[in-house]
Image: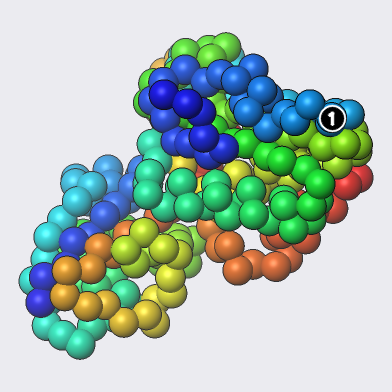
Amino acid sequence: MRVTVRLFARLRDLAGSGELVRDIQGPATVQGIWKALVAEFPAIAEYERSMSVAVNADYSRMSAEVNEGDEVAFLPPVSGG
Amino acid sequence: MPLTATAITAAPLDVQGLAALVSAGGDGAVASFVGVVRDRNLGRRVMFLEYEAYEALALKALDRIVAEAREAWPDTRLAVHHRTGRLEIGEASVAIAAASPHRAHAFAACRYAIERVKQIVPIWKREHFDGGEVWLEGATADPQDEAARDSALRIACA
């Protein structure tokens, strides 16, 4: 199935792109997509403990299920204001 | 375009407009806060900042902050706008206005909103300083984190 991955701020810089489309084998979780991304971009691994995740623009958890067409976002610690 | 209570925008912020938006004729208090790009940070001379947002989620997070404030201070109306893109020293990055019959609630809602923005809104700033650039990273965003919310409430009511 096809999912869109969104990366922001330094995570985007480390991966070299803010939006990636990936075909993955279902059923999948956010955790599974993260693991595949880390294999592709090892430098992002350091964010596993500090980042937040979102599915379809709602905060979510690593254990959440991901479905065909979903947008999964990985978010470094925020610094708005 | 008429102002809405929450917005993520590349356009300059209008705190007067927000104050007017939240004010009703009979209010006793309107408090506002404007966050402004500072010229120094951690001993570095800042040249400018670049703000990036996950817009769809950032807007929902701002709406959540407004709902939380309404729960904490039911007589208070709140508006929060955050800017994105390149901001020069002295430009406003965030504007907040709160109106209430009582000043304590208006001040508290304003302070609560900026504390929560820093906790749960997916926005990042890249600091361009004299000699380099760096992404700043603060809180791990988790709206379900009750301890963070309590901390913001305590600061707001101190």
For the point 47% across and 17% down, the residue is B12
For the point 18% across and 61% down, the residue is A4
Q: From the viewer's perspective, is residue B83 above or below residue B143?
A: above
Position of residue B143 measured from the top left corner of the image (x, y, whole percent): 58, 62
Q: Residue furthest bottom?
A: A27
Q: Does residue A71 appear to the left or right of B98 in the view shown?
A: left
For the point 27% across and 43% down, the residue is A13
Q: Chain of mark 1?
A: B
* Residue type for callout 1: Gly
SS of the residue under disc 1? loop
Q: From the viewer's perspective, is residue B38 above or below residue A57?
A: above
Which of the pair B31/B128 is nearer the observer?
B31
Position of residue B129 measured from the top left corner of the image (x, y, whole percent): 46, 19
Residue B158 falls in which quadrant of the image?
Answer: top right
Which of the pair B29/B26 is nearer the observer?
B26
Q: Which quadrant, please, contains the N terminus of chain B? A: top left
Residue B115 falls in which quadrant of the image?
Answer: top right
Which of the pair B102/A15 is nearer the observer?
B102
Question: What colour scheme has been applied to the protein in the rendered image?
Answer: rainbow
Q: Number of labelled discs?
A: 1
Residue B97 falls in which quadrant of the image?
Answer: top right
Q: Does residue B75 appear to the left or right of B68 in the view shown?
A: right
Q: Residues within 10 Å of mark 1 (few under 14, many from 20)?
A: few
Q: Is any part of residue B7 visible from this angle?
A: yes
Position of residue B60 measured from the top left corner of the image (x, y, whole percent): 48, 52
Position of residue B85 measured from the top left corner of the image (x, y, whole percent): 37, 26
Q: Does residue A19 appear to the left or right of B63 in the view shown?
A: left
For the point 52% across and 35% down, the residue is B4
Q: Which residue was labeled with disc 1? A: B26
Q: Is any part of residue B35 visible from this angle?
A: no
